[in-house]
Amino acid sequence: MLSPEEFIPQAVGARLPVNKVSVVNGEEQQHWQKAEILSIRNDEPNSKHPVEFYVHYEGFNKRLDEWVPLSALDLSKVKFGKTQKKSAPNAVPGAKGTTVAAPPVTPSGNPASRVEGSGSGAAFGVPHNAIVPQKRKRPDRDRTPSEKQSQATPMDTTSEQASQDAGNVEGGEGGEEGGEEEDTFSKEKELEKLRVGGSMTQCLTEVARLKNINKIVMGKYEVEAWYFSPYPEEFSQLPRIYLCEFCLEAVGSARQFERHRAKCTLRHPPGNEIYRDEQSHISFWEIDGKRQRQYCRNLCLLSKLFLDHKTLYYDVDPFMFYIMTSSDNVGHHFLGYFSKEKHSSEDYNVACILTLPQHQRMGYGKLLIQFSYELSKIEKKTGSPEKPLSDLGLLSYRSYWADTILEKLYEYKGELSIQELSEETSITPDDIMHTLQALDLIKYYRGLYVIYLSQGNMQHHEKNVAKNRTRIDPAKLHWTPPKFTASQLRYGY
Ligand code: ACO
Ligand code: ZN
């Protein structure tokens, strides 16, 4: 067994069991979980602060990465990596309170995050890889996703639900494979990627960085951040940052926030309200990234806290943003959003989608998804979300696709072709095909594929209808697709 003095100088990159504390159904549970040390702080011999290690749990989503004390490490089972530096303390600056080493790339592979097994794919007992079109090269993910559910309560810290699962889920740590491929980050490259690929996937060194923001306070909620987001560096020293719910400006202290609120007159997102439902108090606002750059950049910074591998920071011009709010007598409070390319060469109808953690698992994600398809219906196009999807994104889309397709089949008593289903729903034929396979609704019969609606599927649909969830009412959507001239679509500075 190594002593702490022997271990600390070579800790970064080492793998060992870590005593992980999880909150499952409101109860704290501890277990030993294999992890890799990504960083160490306060390792100065005379530092008043204790040494802490930033660990990544193998097989878990990166949003569970955290700082742990020395006492949480099992130093009797340390494994060192091949490329590991043996002299970490001298190799990096070690100012008090700062991070002293940050290897840019986490291990290869695609560990999963945790999800309670309730996604549609799982519910229907079908391999998950059956459902998403394989347009780009992606890791195997035909296993059950798992996840930390992070949901904040008013002025409460984020709770965590976790239990290990053998699954690889795309987006769990998406963007980390092939770590050597690309490790410089430049504005030009990002712009080129946006122009050519329509992709919002970011440079790997950016996405692999350590979580830098602890918590955000937004309205009456305090929420833990999940991932790195490029907020000003000084924010990373703070226990929490404060965000204005209306303009999304971030400040570092409660006093600064009070000053901001006294000046800020905004009470809703700075765009056109294109949807309003008086009953549910839900509205949608359309915002052009080029016209509201500051707001959209603030939004991207905020959403990067909860999106690991997809989002952009400053080049918001090529995108439209659709913000979902809930209104009360104070104003329209931000619930979630999705962004959409003004011109998508791959017919994506959503680039990034997010429900703020404090509002997750209440059906808002599916409302956002439904809204994105309602826009596609008006455009008379089919659309699909930009790949790769995160684990939670995949779950939500699967569930939406399954609900929507079953609903249509039920309505038409199964008498619909894939093409007709696609025309009715604006879901691409690829996504429909994968969903039908996942639901076991497609049979090969006498040389032909036929859709077969089983009793079980009908019951599932009836149960779903009985839940009586809030849905988007197309009659309340007042929208004409924005048109852009070629010069408006030429982005640049
Ligand atoms: N565990 C298990 N199931 C879950 C979980 C979870 N943590 N979260 C959502 N689900 C399931 C729900 O049960 C529901 O399925 P059901 O209707 O069959 O029961 C479905 O997923 C959707 O749930 P909603 O409550 O409608 O979705 P939510 O408001 O939680 O938002 C979203 C989903 C947007 C993916 C949210 O989790 C999020 O913002 N995550 C972080 C950002 C992210 O990963 N975005 C997607 C990236 S991919 C892309 O951008 C194209
Ligand atoms: Zn403000």
Image (spheres, rainbow, N blue to C red):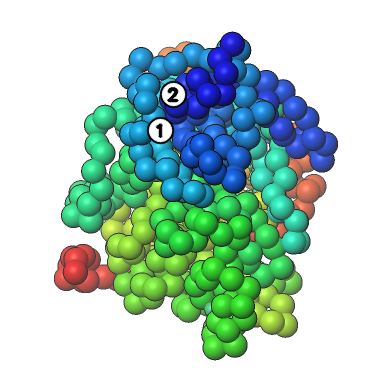
Note whether 100 is above or below 486 in the view shown.
above
Residue 81, image quadrant: top left
Label 2 lies in ligand 1 vicinity (Cβ under 8 Å)? no
Query: In which quadrant is the N terminus drawn?
Result: top right
Marks 1,2: beta carbons within 8 A: no
Could you say where residue 280 lies in the image, as x and y percent from the top left? 72, 68
Note whether 365 is above or below 493 in the view shown.
above
Q: Find numbered disc 2 in the image and state the secondary structure of the residue it sits on.
A: helix
Q: CA distance from mark 1 to mark 2?
A: 8 Å
**Picture quarter with ligand 2:** bottom right
Q: Find numbered disc 1 in the image and state the secondary structure of the residue it sits on.
A: helix
Residue at x-position 69% and y-position 72%: 281
The amino acid at mark 2 is Gln
Using a 10 Å C-alpha cutoff, classify the residue at mark 2 as few (fewer than 14 neighbours), some (14 to 19) or many (20 or more): some
Residue at x-position 72% and y-position 77%: 328
Q: Nearer the viewer, residue 418 or 482?
A: 482
Could you say where residue 252 lies in the image, as x and y percent from the top left? 54, 68
Residue 489, image quadrant: bottom left
Q: Nearer the viewer, residue 381 or 202?
A: 202
The amino acid at mark 1 is Pro
Q: Nearer the viewer, residue 415 or 464?
A: 464
Q: Is residue 409 visible?
A: no
Which mark, by number, is residue 445? none
- Residue identified by numbered label 1: 89
> With 466 as the anchor, is 160 left or right in this view?
left
Residue 263, image quadrant: bottom right
Using a 10 Å C-alpha cutoff, classify the residue at mark 1 as few (fewer than 14 neighbours), some (14 to 19) or many (20 or more): some
Label 1 lies in ligand 1 vicinity (Cβ under 8 Å)? no
Could you say where residue 71 lies in the image, as x and y percent from the top left? 67, 28
Q: Residue furthest front?
A: 46
- Residue identified by numbered label 2: 10
Earlier sequence position, callout 1 versus callout 2 = 2
